[in-house]
Image (cartoon, grey):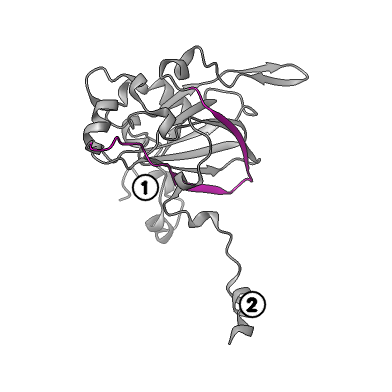
Amino acid sequence: MPSSQDKPWKGLKPSARGRLETRDYSKAPLVSRIARDGVQAGEVIAGRDGLDEAWIPGVEVFARRVFQQKGRGYFSELTRLTEGVLDRIHLAPRQWASALMHRDSAKGFHIHPPHVPDGVDPASWFHQLFSGPNPDPALRPYDREQWDVMFFLTGICEIILVDEREGMPRRIMRFTIAGDSRPGPDNAAVVIPPGVAHALRSIGGEDLIMVYGTSTTFNPSWEGRIESAVENSALPADWVDYLNAGEA
């Protein structure tokens, strides 16, 4: 006799029912999904108070407002350096840049070296900056290391962060930010500390345009890469064989 689970499918052949799978639409807790499946930026912002055990110290994700202008388009602010998150953490970017990622492309993982004073244990230093009682953002050496603050103007970005700082828990945060061209609760900006590896994927149906500020000016020697082969557009194997044919 068919089980209660089989009843909706009694019109199928037994061989098909034996191979049948149905998707589980129930959601695991946010604290586990942010590190595994990925979540929306709006969920991250709304659920921040319950994410302490999954949050990467120093990372900030904050909401942005996009104002629709009927018949013309939209207007949005990036940030104000004298109020809000950047003011609270004393981060005033010294350089601003823009980047475009074509749809279905990816970058990363990128990572910038954190500054650790000479003679100081890295784990103790990071604990002082981020984990101790009442850590003071004013102690962060923004002028000696690269922090990023990213804003997205078009498209949809999936971002993955991995904490690789010595002595810090290796936490992963994975979430999706919508560009200003898609107004809604997932319009957000993200602050990324040095020592936190970050990768970006353009997953929308349009190109991803971003604007980002850095705490220092561009330093090529600080541009570390981890597992970044996705950035290379490999030629077909037969093309490579043909191009190398004359080297024998």
Residue at the (27%, 32%) spot, across then down: 126
Q: Is residue 188 above or below residue 26?
A: above
Tell which of 88 and 209 is nearer to you: 88
Most extreme residue toward the bottom, as rendered? Answer: 248
Are there few (<14), some (14-19), or many (20+) residues within 10 Å of tag 1? some
Q: Quick one: label 1 or label 2, which is nearer the N terminus?
A: 1
Q: Disc 2 marks which amino acid?
A: Leu
> As drawn, is 110 to the left or to the right of 122?
right
User: How far across and down, in percent of the image, does residue 197 sit?
Assistant: 40, 43
Residue 41 on the magenta segment: no
Residue 95 on the magenta segment: yes
Q: Disc 1 marks which amino acid?
A: Asp
User: How far across and down, in percent of the image, does residue 221 sit?
Assistant: 46, 47
Residue at the (40%, 50%) spot, across then down: 21
Highlighted magenta segment, given as a residue range = 92-119
Q: Give the quadrant of residue 135.
A: top left
Q: Give the quadrant of residue 111.
A: top left
Residue under numbered circle 1: 6
Most extreme residue toward the front, as rendered? Answer: 118
